[in-house]
Image: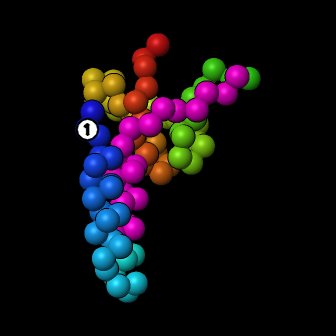
Amino acid sequence: MKDYSQSISYMRGEMAKQSAAHQHRYLDAIEAMERLNPTEPRHDNTSPNMFCSNCGKEYCFRSIGDRKHRERVCNNCGQHMAWDWR
């Protein structure tokens, strides 16, 4: 899995150099890279289900490719998550 932390830091530095009128483009790019950075899902102790760490929605199986790459993508917000297959 790719780590986008350095790219996010670089984009934040570049955004600071831009005028306010152009900063929103950098914010959009940073938000997209943050969603590509895999996070751990939230676990609810009262339920065996896992939930997206970004939007909180219960995860729904998307494709067999998720299983092969050990990464899942939230169907609601697009957040990539590194989950174990149990």
Residue 25 showing in the rendered view: no
Q: Which kind of residue does numbered mark 1 sit on? A: Lys
Q: Residue at x 27, y 53 (%)?
A: 7
Q: In the rendered image, which residue does mark 1 sit on?
A: 2
Q: Position of residue 86 (x, y in %)?
A: 47, 13
Q: Position of residue 23 (x, y in %)?
A: 37, 77
Instruction: Magenta stretch: give its range.
Output: 26-45
Q: Position of residue 42 (x, y in %)?
A: 58, 32
Name of the residue lying farthest toward the right: 46
> Which is nearer the eye, 9 or 51?
9
> Which is nearer the eye, 8 or 83?
8
Q: Residue at x 36, y 43 (%)?
A: 37
Crowding at mark 1 (Cα within 10 Å: few <14, some 14-19, many 20+): few
Q: Residue at x 39, y 75 (%)?
A: 24
Q: Position of residue 31 (x, y in %)?
A: 40, 59
Is 15 covered by the magenta stretch?
Answer: no
Vertical comparison of 24 with 37: above or below: below
Is 29 covered by the magenta stretch?
Answer: yes
Residue 14 showing in the rendered view: yes
Please identify the quarter of the rendering in which residue 28 is found.
bottom left
